[in-house]
């Protein structure tokens, strides 16, 4: 999929005033013209690939929601007001991050809705992969809505291509309804339609396993632990063949294949193909020229996220994940010569090496964003088993992850002890991969963890974009989130 040239198709309708200026300035496409684009199997394939591509912009900033908002990451150098606002809970509804995030996800939803609408009208004889494209559109729509409700709470539920007038009358729908009527429904159906595996140029597109893994996370988020256990159990047995890599560091070695036995679903990026690379490598690097030169990183540094000292101090001796996950504090050791370089006080003093790879042009890295991988599935499975009163069973998937890191297996833990242990294991295993904040919120631990840096009780969600509130201009249909008025 990384080698496919992306075709963006402009969908009809839903041209919200919140969308990026370049998007809303495009001339609307007449229905007849749009229909002409959806005739053959190839037409739908191009449309689906364009919908995947639409997620790239948003996932370039996903670390701000999943990591920077939590307690394991922070902004050490306060030269980026928006990022600092996310970090210390001072971001407001007029911030561009809120506006762009809302727009990015609704672009994905609109594209998916348009594809589903057109697919419903075509004959399978003309579109042989009709079922698969339906599953992919549902999967992508479910992903977009899952992220939206985790970020904003209640949002507009739109499952068809509406007119602008219809959008103006669409209220914010409670998150619980969106989970049941769109996210879970879409993922269940997608799981019946998607292929078991993808090969060749199709690698990187959604599979049955990806749909089930995201569904398992949704069930944990909604505290439906019985259904979470059921769906996650499936991923640990045939016909699925997922397995942990032997060496944790290989997950972040970008000279190797990123679609290995532990891979389930990534947001795909690639260098040198005209703007479809990721920003992670540059964004997280400190301002240390000799270090940038050694790793072949061109275009500059971002200083955008650092491990907190408190998180660094939690790591246990002998954990093989620590070296690549957290580097602290204020120095770098050249892996070739062993020489130590001390950082200037004007740059970040701690960083993660998970996204380091040569970059020829600023923000054009080949590093993917790992949405879900098998270690995450195993830890979710352990959590579901434990919450369902099966702590002894939960030790098996937990210990697969824990012992891969070179640590001694856990044993004899109570349900309460195991609950805390799994939460800690998720912090170490999945650090800086976009999970920590959402884990804190769904387990009810966010305020306890983040109150010291400014969190108030209503801040489990972000403010809805001010542009949206003003465009809708109806506090009954479209209120601002509590506390952000």
Image (cartoon, rainbow, N blue to C red):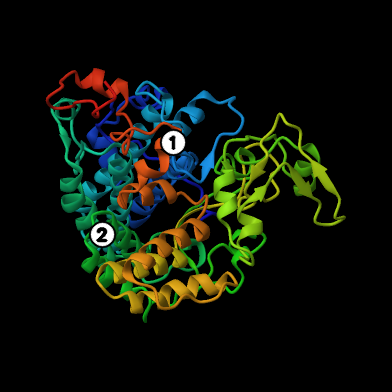
Residue where numbered disc 1 is placed: 452
Is 97 left or right of 168, judged from the image as shown? right
Is 238 left or right of 476, judged from the image as shown? right
Q: Give the image location of residue 165, x and y in percent.
A: 15, 25
> Alpha-carbon neighbours of circle 2 within 10 Å: few (<14), some, or many (≥20)?
many
Is 96 rendered above or below residue 351?
Answer: above
For image coordinates 37% across by 63% down, the residue present is 210
Image mark count: 2
Is 429 left or right of 194, judged from the image as shown? right
Q: Toward which corner of the image does residue 452 lie, by quadrant?
A: top left
Is 44 rendered above or below residue 78?
Answer: below
Tell me the quadrant of the picture where the C terminus can be found.
Answer: top left
For image coordinates 31% across by 37% down, the residue present is 461
Q: Toward which corner of the image does residue 189 lie, by quadrant?
A: bottom left
Q: Earlier in the sequence, mark 1 or mark 2?
A: 2
Is 155 rendered above or below residue 190?
Answer: above
> Alpha-carbon neighbours of circle 1 within 10 Å: few (<14), some, or many (≥20)?
few
Q: Secondary structure at mark 2?
A: helix
Q: Secondary structure at mark 1?
A: helix
For image coordinates 65% across by 51% down, the residue present is 353
Is 374 left or right of 293, judged from the image as shown? left
Residue 35 or residue 8, whichever sits in front: 8
Q: Give the image location of residue 362, x and y in percent.
A: 65, 36
Q: Which mark is residue 219?
A: 2
Residue 68 or residue 245, whichever sits in front: 68
From the image, state whether disc 1 or disc 2 is nearer to you: 1
């Amino acid at each position: 999929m990384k080698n496919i040239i992306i075709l963006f198709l402009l969908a009809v309708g839903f041209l919200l005033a919140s969308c990026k200026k370049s998007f809303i300035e495009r001339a609307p496409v007449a229905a007849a013209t749009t229909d002409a684009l959806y005739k053959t199997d190839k037409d739908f394939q191009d449309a689906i690939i364009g919908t995947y591509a639409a997620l790239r912009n948003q996932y370039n900033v996903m670390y701000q929601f999943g990591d920077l908002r939590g307690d394991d990451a922070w902004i050490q150098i306060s030269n980026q007001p928006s990022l600092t606002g996310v970090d210390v809970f001072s971001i407001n509804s007029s911030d561009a991050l809120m506006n762009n995030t809302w727009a990015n996800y609704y672009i994905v939803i609109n594209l998916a809705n348009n594809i589903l609408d057109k697919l419903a009208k075509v004959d399978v004889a003309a579109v042989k992969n009709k079922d698969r494209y339906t599953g992919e559109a549902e999967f992508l729509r479910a992903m977009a809505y899952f992220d939206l409700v985790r970020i904003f709470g209640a949002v507009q539920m739109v499952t068809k291509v509406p007119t602008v007038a219809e959008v103006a009358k669409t209220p914010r729908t409670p998150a619980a309804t969106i989970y049941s009527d769109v996210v879970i429904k879409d993922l269940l159906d997608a799981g019946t339609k998607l292929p078991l595996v993808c090969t060749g140029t199709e690698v990187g597109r959604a599979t049955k396993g990806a749909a089930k893994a995201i569904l398992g996370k949704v069930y944990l988020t909604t505290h439906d632990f019985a259904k979470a256990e059921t769906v996650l159990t499936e991923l640990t047995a045939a016909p699925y063949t997922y397995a942990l890599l032997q060496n944790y560091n290989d997950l972040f070695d970008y000279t190797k294949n990123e679609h290995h036995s532990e891979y389930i679903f990534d947001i795909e990026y690639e260098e040198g193909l005209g703007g479809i690379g990721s920003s992670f490598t540059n964004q997280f690097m400190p301002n240390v020229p000799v270090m940038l030169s050694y790793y072949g990183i061109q275009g500059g540094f971002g200083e955008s996220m650092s491990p907190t000292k408190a998180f660094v101090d939690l790591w246990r001796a002998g954990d093989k994940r620590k070296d690549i996950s957290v580097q602290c504090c204020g120095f770098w050791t050249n892996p070739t010569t062993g020489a130590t370089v001390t950082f200037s006080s004007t740059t970040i003093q701690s960083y993660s090496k998970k996204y380091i790879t040569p970059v020829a042009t600023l923000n054009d890295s080949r590093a993917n964003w790992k949405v879900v991988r098998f270690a995450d599935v195993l830890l979710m499975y352990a959590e579901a088993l434990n919450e369902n009163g099966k702590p002894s069973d939960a030790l098996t998937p937990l210990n697969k992850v824990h012992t891969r890191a070179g640590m001694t297996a856990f044993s004899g833990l109570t349900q309460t002890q195991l609950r805390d242990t799994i939460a800690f294991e998720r912090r170490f295993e999945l650090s800086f991969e976009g999970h920590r904040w959402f884990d804190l919120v769904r387990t009810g631990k966010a305020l306890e963890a983040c109150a010291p840096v400014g969190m108030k009780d209503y801040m489990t969600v972000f403010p809805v974009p001010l542009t949206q509130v003003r465009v809708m201009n109806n506090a009954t249909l479209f209120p601002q989130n509590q506390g952000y008025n």
